[in-house]
Amino acid sequence: MEEAAENHFQTLTVCTQAKGIAIRVASPKLVMEEAPESYKDVSEVVDTCHTAGISKKCIKLRPIAVIKG
């Protein structure tokens, strides 16, 4: 199982580096929690909330860093 996690970590690292994203973690297991497939498409969520009238779109932001600790 450890080898499969390491292979997934390496694949994820290559994919994120291709997008200009750098990952620095103490353990590859922590990256799996933050893998892109773990999240919904934020644009879809925002559009749904806007259409439902529970929020109003006003500005689009782009994250430059995520720090967890």
Image (cartoon, rainbow, N blue to C red):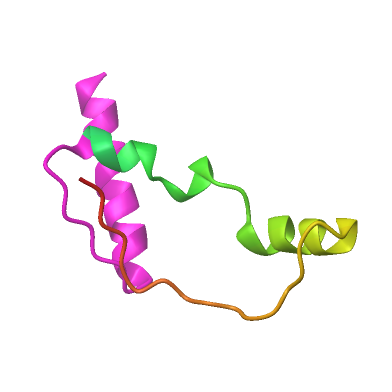
Q: Is residue 60 left or right of residue 4?
A: right
Q: Position of residue 19 (x, y in %)?
A: 38, 71
Image quarter of residue 23: bottom left
Residue 1 located left or right of residue 35: left
At x 50%, y 41%, the residue is 38
Residue at 41 percent of width and 71 percent of height: 63
Q: Position of residue 14 (x, y in %)?
A: 29, 59
Residue 46 point in image, percent of width and height: 71, 62
User: Residue 49's spot in the image, x, y percent?
Assistant: 78, 57
Which quadrant would the C terminus be assigned to in this image? Answer: top left
Taking depth in this image into account, of 28 and 46 the one nearest to the observer is: 46
- When the figure is inspected, residue 15 is found, relative to residue 26, above or below; the finding is below
Q: Which residues are magenta?
A: 1-28
Residue shown at the point (36%, 60%) measured from the top left: 15
**Residue 23 in the image: above or below residue 25:** below
Q: Quadrant of residue 21?
A: bottom left
Total marks drawn? 0
User: Quadrant location of residue 1?
Assistant: top left
Q: Nearer the viewer, residue 10 or 22?
A: 22
